[in-house]
Image (cartoon, grey):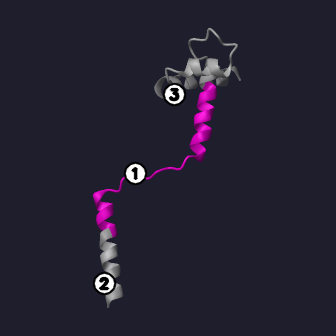
Amino acid sequence: MAVDDTLFKKVTVVWYALHGHRPSDASDRRERARWYTTKTYPSVSDMGAKLRRVIIAARFLPTSPGRPTNQEIRAVQQEWAAASLDTAA
């Protein structure tokens, strides 16, 4: 169990360093928990909580498709043209 906990902490810290860090994180935490008056850096627990919030939010956010490629646009236009020819006949 200790290996899993250590691995979780390492992955969390790496994720936070690469994707999750915001300069205001420690001050936001002080606002939510007033007893952390001297907190200057987020703890591993804070990082884990932020990771959980991001994962939960990602489950409910809609995914937006990327821009279509030129090939996809041409394929749709060709299908529209073929459909309009079928209905005109």
Q: CA distance from mark 2 to mark 3?
A: 53 Å
Q: Quadrant of residue 6?
A: top right
Task: Name the residue type under label 1.
Answer: Gly
Residue 23 seen in the figure: yes
Q: Which residue is mark 1?
A: 66
6 left or right, relative to 87: right
- The disc label shown at residue 58, or none: none
Q: Which residue is mark 2?
A: 85
Q: What span is in magenta? A: 48-76
Residue at image point 32% right, 56% down: 69
Q: Quadrant of residue 84?
A: bottom left
Pinpoint residue 36: horizontal percent, then vertical percent.
66, 13
Q: Earlier in the sequence, mark 3 or mark 1?
A: 3
- The disc label shown at residue 20, or none: 3
Pinpoint residue 35: horizontal percent, then vertical percent.
70, 13
Residue 7 seen in the figure: no
* Rendered-image quadrant of the N terminus: top right
59 left or right, relative to 77: right
Q: Residues within 10 Å of mark 2 (few under 14, many from 20)?
A: few
Residue at image point 64% right, 27% down: 49
> SS of the residue at dot 2?
helix
> SS of the residue at dot 1?
loop
7 is higher (above) or lower (below) than 70: above
